[in-house]
Image (tube, grey):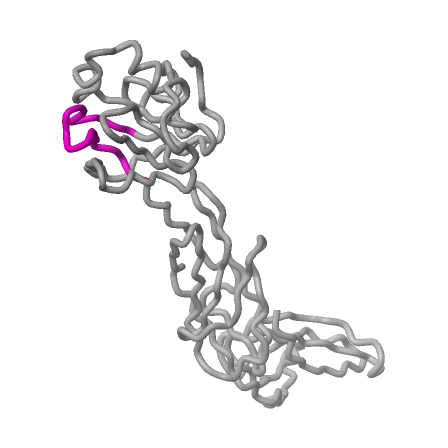
Amino acid sequence: MLFTGSRANAVTLWTGPNTNFTQFLPNPSDQLTPGVALDRGANGPLYNSVTENSPNGVTSPADTLWAFGSISNYSTLSYQTFAAIRNNAAPNLGAVLSNQPMVLQLVNEQIYISLKFTAWGEMQAGGFTYIRSTPSAAPAPSVSITNPANSAVFSAPANVHLGANATVSSGTVTNVAFFGNATSLGSATNTPFSITASNLAAGSYALTAVATAAGVSATSAVVNISVVTPVAVVLSSVAATNGVFGFNYTANPGLTYVVQNSSNFTAWLPLSTNLASNSPVHFTNGLVPNSYRFYRVGRLPNP
């Protein structure tokens, strides 16, 4: 049987480090996957000892096809059963196989393996030796924290929404775990990868996210945040000069405050929303002649 054409759909290429395998009775077969183990007994043909008790001379080894060539060209090689190669090469199969680059296709799994026989024939009760590639190491995911921003400040006790972007070049990210100062804050198993860390006490937190894909993990860069005990908002240094009204108010740097005014203590209008950079914060507002204005300052909730 001869098989040609492209096999580029949902395939896996084993391009990991080469390993040298030798099999002869009573040595075990080469267990490639749970469904394929290559074996040979008493100078006979190859067979798949997982699903076959002996070679049938036609389709053995089951679940495999073979081609001469490089794995870099796997999608355009001409594949056939090993039995067909054996029949075409008889009685010189050893010479045909010797040191020739080949590609082994595990049909059901759509896995392609680079392989080169280095010995075949009159060994101890048959057997063979070949060099083959191994599974490629799973790629490491990449992960970064998208929320909160570095240097963000929250008032205690803080419920902080944590979010991360995590991807991997092949496969799927199956878990993103979040840590604060190396202590687990929780994890997410699906996109969007996010959790809420509840009731964080005042202090500094070094946040990291650890993404895992196919058993391989990677850690994000650190995002530093602060949780502070909020100070009472106190107004002071109230003054009106040259048509300008002003005052100071106490604040926690990094927290956000809103200044409002009203003419009747009922309808309050926001005048300024300010991310405090220092304390006290100085506020000014133009005076309106012949009118009353009342002012208040409030701290906004954590984002």
Q: Provide residue 287's location: percent of width, then percent of height.
A: 71, 76
Asked if 57 appears above or below 223 in the picture, the reply is above
- Identify the residue at image location x=57%, y=54%: 190
Asked if 283 appears above or below 193 in the picture, the reply is below
Asked if 44 appears above or below 19 in the picture, the reply is above
- Identify the residue at image location x=39%, y=26%: 64
The reply, left or right, for residue 237 in relation to residue 48 is right
Asked if the stretch drawn in magenta spans residue 49, the answer is no
The reply, left or right, for residue 173 in relation to residue 247 is left
State the quadrant of the C terminus: bottom right
The reply, left or right, for residue 230 in relation to residue 286 is left
Q: Which residues are magenta?
A: 114-135
Asked if the stretch drawn in magenta spans residue 121, the answer is yes
Q: Is residue 282 visible in the rendered structure shown here?
A: no
User: In terms of depth relative to the viewer, which is nearer, 78 or 173?
Assistant: 78
State the quadrant of the N terminus: top left
Q: Provide residue 37's location: percent of width, then percent of height.
A: 35, 37
> Residue lying farthest top?
88
User: In terms of depth relative to the viewer, which is nearer, 2 or 135?
Assistant: 2
User: In terms of depth relative to the viewer, which is nearer, 87 or 108?
Assistant: 87
